[in-house]
């Protein structure tokens, strides 16, 4: 067994510092105004540091929410004895900023609900451990927070659950599995928040919520003889966010909401850490709905786009700083609402910044130490206004060396883009709203054009061929499919939908599973996919095979 990987897994299991919901009075007591925090940070450390007066408030506010009965952490941190017994480990993981797991680097976006410890808190813990971990006067000990066990946001508008429980094995590697939650509402709804209630909270690490309007999840559920289904490649119709261990339920800011279409189901993409004993998980969701559609549509874009699938990710064994880069030029004025990132095990860092039309640079997001186990989504404390023409640059780095403790292969192997967790992906993901509602269509067309431009710019290289980053493309002829070939084959299929042979595909020809996808190809928004838009699918290279002959126009009455 890879001992480095075992150690990292153990620490991530045993010191989960996400802040779970507290009772309202405890939140008020623990929360401090920024000015008060800044003033306290300037104070010199006390001559004598004790648990009761100095360390307990830090632990209770940042650690005890997970380190208590029924939560994911395997031991309690609820009193002096609990903390003193593991004091040296706590000092080590807080000093390295490994815990609590708050990954955005300060100065690269101002995010709400930060779980990052203040420097002074880290110094207090370190001094307490070095000076003997004295308990202090019990009269100075603050009250342990009253963690709320009911619905955090009040009674949901709809409660739905998995139909059957899934058995999580006692040991072995982590488990990734998808679960169907049948919803099938009789009308469209708009979701402002989803609150999750796991039945086996000790083993569920995170769960992502996806929308399925195709029925694919129902067809896949239980196909291998066990509740749920495997794989990261199922077709998703939309996203409703997600939850990670210790995360608190909260509503979207600015009265925003996410669509849950009529008849749709929810798919949970869940990640489990086996705990040493068999657990049964039957997840329940509480859905909160808006009374009306949002005033603005919540939009998304990525740099690089499509989780890096167009960026030629092909990471040689031993490469400690393999990079992919891309940019997106805003076609309209937007307000950034939130940011996050995605990669698999050997992700190293992600960074994004904006260059405004006047040349001003603004840092937006930076995770300097990526950890696959903690994939958060972060809301800006205030929307970040960016004007049309702003260029957002992003870089994602990977470490495929033997020195990376998260590397799943020992010795390292070549890693390419793919859907499995031992493959790689990489992108920085932004959520935004248009300043002017009428610009939403133009924004979405800009996102689609970014995908086409990225594929074309790479000269036909795709997942396993070429490398885009560190100043240019680099690649060989090893395995994989060309972007030009992949998009070219898609172009050929799209051509075949032109049943009347007029070189255009209109609404009547957009049928079946192509209907939603073809709408994305309509880059000028005129409701028709024309020949220029079809040809654009081939990128700058030619198709890897001759285009099929165009179908003859269908005769009426056939």
Image (cartoon, rainbow, N blue to C red):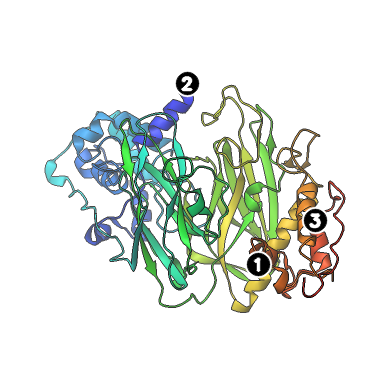
Q: Residue furthest left?
A: 139
CA–CA distance in space, label 2 to label 1: 47 Å
Residue named by callout 1: 444
- Kindly identify the residue that appears in the image at 63 percent across and 78 percent down: 438
CA–CA distance in space, label 3 to label 2: 47 Å
Estimate how packed mark 2 is, as few (under 14), some (14 to 19) or many (20 or more) residues with alpha carbons within 10 Å. Answer: few
Residue 461 drawn above or below residue 192: above
Estimate how packed mark 1 is, as few (under 14), some (14 to 19) or many (20 or more) residues with alpha carbons within 10 Å. Answer: some
Q: Helix, strand or loop at disc 3?
A: helix
Asked if residue 267 lies left or right of residue 450, the reply is left
- Kindly identify the residue that appears in the image at 44 percent across and 31 percent down: 173
Q: Earlier in the sequence, mark 2 or mark 1?
A: 2
The answer to whether residue 330 is seen in the rendering is no
Residue 247 drawn above or below residue 466: below
* Quadrant position of the C terminus in the picture: bottom right
Residue 448 drawn above or below residue 307: below
Q: Helix, strand or loop at disc 2?
A: loop
Give the quadrant of residue 74: top left
Q: Earlier in the sequence, mark 1 or mark 3?
A: 1
Residue 492: mark in rendering: 3
Asked if residue 284 lies left or right of residue 343, the reply is left
Residue 1: mark in rendering: 2
Q: Position of residue 148 (x, y in %)?
A: 24, 55
């Amino acid at each position: 067994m890879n001992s480095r990987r075992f150690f990292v897994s153990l620490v991530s299991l045993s010191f989960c510092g996400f802040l779970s919901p507290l009772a309202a009075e405890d939140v008020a007591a623990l929360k401090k105004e920024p000015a008060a925090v800044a003033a306290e940070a300037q104070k010199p450390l006390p001559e004598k540091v004790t648990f009761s007066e100095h360390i307990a408030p830090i632990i209770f506010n940042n650690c005890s929410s997970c380190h208590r009965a029924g939560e994911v952490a395997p031991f309690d941190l609820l009193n002096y004895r609990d903390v003193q017994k593991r004091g040296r480990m706590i000092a080590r993981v807080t000093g390295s900023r490994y815990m609590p797991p708050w990954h955005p680097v300060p100065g690269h976006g101002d995010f709400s609900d930060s779980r990052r410890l203040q420097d002074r808190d880290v110094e207090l813990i370190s001094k307490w451990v070095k000076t003997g971990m004295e308990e202090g006067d019990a009269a100075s000990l603050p009250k342990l927070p009253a963690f709320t066990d009911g619905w955090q946001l009040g009674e949901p508008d709809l409660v739905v659950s998995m139909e059957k429980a899934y058995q999580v094995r006692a040991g072995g590697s982590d488990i990734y599995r998808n679960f169907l939650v049948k919803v099938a509402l009789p009308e469209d709804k708009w979701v402002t928040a989803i609150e999750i209630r796991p039945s086996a909270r000790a083993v569920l690490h995170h769960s992502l919520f996806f929308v399925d309007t195709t029925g694919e999840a129902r067809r896949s559920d239980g196909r291998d003889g066990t509740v749920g289904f495997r794989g990261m490649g199922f077709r998703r119709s939309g996203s409703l966010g997600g939850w990670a261990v210790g995360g608190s339920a909260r509503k979207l800011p600015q009265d925003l909401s996410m669509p849950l279409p009529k008849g749709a189901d929810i798919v949970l993409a869940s990640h489990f850490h086996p705990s040493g004993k068999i657990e049964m998980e039957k997840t329940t969701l509480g859905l909160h709905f808006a009374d009306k559609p949002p005033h603005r549509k919540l939009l998304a874009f990525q740099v690089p786009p499509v989780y890096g699938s167009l960026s030629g990710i092909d990471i040689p064994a031993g490469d400690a700083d393999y990079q992919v880069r891309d940019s997106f030029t805003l076609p309209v004025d937007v307000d950034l609402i939130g940011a996050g990132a995605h990669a698999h095990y050997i992700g190293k860092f992600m960074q994004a910044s904006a260059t405004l039309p006047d040349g001003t640079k603004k840092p937006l997001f930076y995770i300097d130490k990526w950890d696959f186990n903690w994939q958060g989504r972060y809301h800006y404390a205030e929307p970040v206004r960016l004007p049309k023409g702003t260029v957002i640059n992003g870089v994602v780095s990977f470490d495929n060396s033997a020195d990376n403790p998260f590397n799943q292969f020992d010795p390292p192997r070549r890693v390419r883009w793919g859907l499995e967790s031992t493959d790689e992906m990489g992108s920085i993901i932004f959520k935004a709203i248009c300043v002017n509602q009428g610009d939403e269509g133009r924004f979405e067309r800009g996102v689609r054009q970014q995908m086409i431009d990225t594929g074309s710019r790479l000269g036909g290289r795709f997942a396993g061929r070429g490398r885009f980053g560190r100043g240019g493309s680099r690649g060989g002829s090893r395995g994989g499919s060309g972007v030009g070939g992949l998009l070219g084959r898609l172009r050929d299929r799209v051509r075949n939908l032109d049943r009347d042979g007029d070189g255009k595909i209109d609404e009547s020809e957009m049928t079946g599973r192509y209907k939603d996808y073809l709408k994305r190809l309509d880059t000028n928004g005129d409701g028709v996919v024309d020949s220029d838009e079809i040809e654009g699918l081939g990128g700058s290279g030619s198709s890897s095979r001759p285009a099929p002959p165009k179908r003859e126009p269908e005769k009426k009455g056939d």
